[in-house]
Amino acid sequence: MGIKFSEDHEWVELKGDDQVVIGITDFAQEQLGDLVYVELPEVGDECSRGENISVIESVKAASDLVAPVSGTIIEVNSRLEDEPELVTEDSMGEGWFIKVKLSNTSELDDLMDESAYNSFIEE
Amino acid sequence: MLTTSMYQMHLDAGAKMVPFAGYEMPVSYPLGIKKEHLHTRNNAGLFDVSHMGQIRLSGEGAKAALESLVPVDIIDLPLMKLRYALFTNKDGGVMDDLMVTNLGDDSLFLVVNAACKEADFEHLLNNIGVECKVEFLENLALLALQGPKAHEVLAEIAPSTSEMTFMTAKQLVINGIDCFITRSGYTGEDGFEISLPAKHAQKLAQLLHSHDEVEWVGLGARDSLRLEAGLSLYGHELDNDHSPVESSLNWALSKVRRTGGEREGNYLGDNIIMNHLNEGSESKIVGLQPEGRMPVRDGALIEDELGNEAGQVTSGGFGPSINRPIAIARIKKNYIENQSKLFALVRDKKIAVEIVKLPFIKQNYYRG
């Protein structure tokens, strides 16, 4: 399926059958401006879709990362704690946030593909 | 929504515009808040602050009249010098803070906050409109050029500005444009504010911006710069409910206007403010250094170890120059005196904070 996108400007990349890597899109990163702090959830935490799971702080303000899918956090990108600028520099790569084991893979069907997301942000 | 005369320049420069005090203003440019901030600290930042209010008072009674509204020495303010002042209310609170320049010929020039300018103008008209002429200067723009390179840049087009020292003013013609220049600002850096006819502002801005050392800087970095410099912002450290003493602005209260001074009191809220000065106030504005990397922002409550409320953060965020979170807070006096261990509450977490001296950076004013 490749990469899918949420209306909250996250990207979700499927790895294997039921694991995803989640980060924020370049568009989101540009809107937020320079990031100075990322508060990550704990490995083992459960998340449900729509829940705030992480806080992203720019010089100006704090924003929430909203879970685009439900599941269990199995890995976090702890490099972001000391290097939040990774998100600015490489939001789709080194700047990933969390890895989640999905509890309901059908939630992926509700996310947008790249072209749908591109038209979504142009609105 | 109002715009300043440099609106189109901001759009052309790729600014992100936001509503601020009724104006559509640039919060940041493509450089981004952090780099704009650092650029101002290392080179020179150009700010459009035309949304601020510019007011002239004139007439023989102007100085004495203004003294009835501020706890500051205006009568002995030397010619072409600036002084920081505060409009107080009858309860001793602060309506706004402002800069006052003595223009000579019984005239004073005031710069007030954008969000308060209409109220300030009314306040002046209602209280001292009989004693002096109060003019709201609608057709002026205000540019700030701030940073260690600001003086070099300005000296190229206006050589005599290099002789100016901090908090002095000069009337000059630059490229045919009448400019009123003060060596002042609100970033903690050396720099200038230039008041000029709005219709010529784009031209001067272009001239300044054409220097390699100069970049546009938006309101976002303006806020992080003043926060690092430990400077009060109206609506945060200053408000109608707290006296200047409670806002740690004792330094701004002139000796001659204090108890025992030659012209003591005789401004709104004088008894309360002098009482706070003489007896001390229940709370103070202090700097806070949060532990770790997580920013502690405006409104965060401050507690002691037992969970007793000790105060609240008035401004908080991230200081790009010192590369860590910083905050300013109003803290009850006993917690300051006892050097209590304090914590900020951020999203159910307790972040240890230490009371520190303001400013967070070394102020870099040019005093000659």
Image: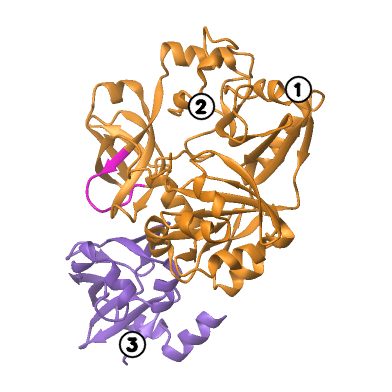
Chain colours: A purple, B orange
Q: Residue B242 got which mark?
A: 2
Label 1 secondary element? loop
Whether pointer 3 and pointer 1 mark residues with C-beta atoms closer than 8 Å, the reply is: no
In the displayed structure image, the side of residue A101 where residue B29 appears, left or right: right
Give the image location of residue B191, x and y in percent: 48, 50
Few, some or many residues within 10 Å of mark 1 (<14, 14–19, 20+) = some
Near-viewer residue (A18 or B98): B98
Question: Foreground: B20 or B44?
Answer: B44
Secondary structure at numbered mark 3: strand
Q: Label 3 amino acid? A: Ile
Which residue is at a point 57% across and 60% down the rendered structure image?
B157
Left-right relation of B20 to B292 = right
Above or below: residue B334 compared with residue B173: above
Q: Earlier in the sequence, mark 1 or mark 2?
A: 1
State whether residue B291 is above or below residue B121.
below
User: Mark 3 belongs to which subunit?
Assistant: A
Query: What residue do we see at 30% from left, 34% from top?
Result: B357
Callouts 1 and 2 in the same chain: yes
Residue at which label 3 appears? A3
Provide residue B229's location: percent of width, then percent of height: 39, 44
Please report the bounds of the magenta region as a residue range.
B288-296
Q: Compute the Cα span from label 3 to label 1.
A: 72 Å
Q: Amino acid at mark 2?
A: His
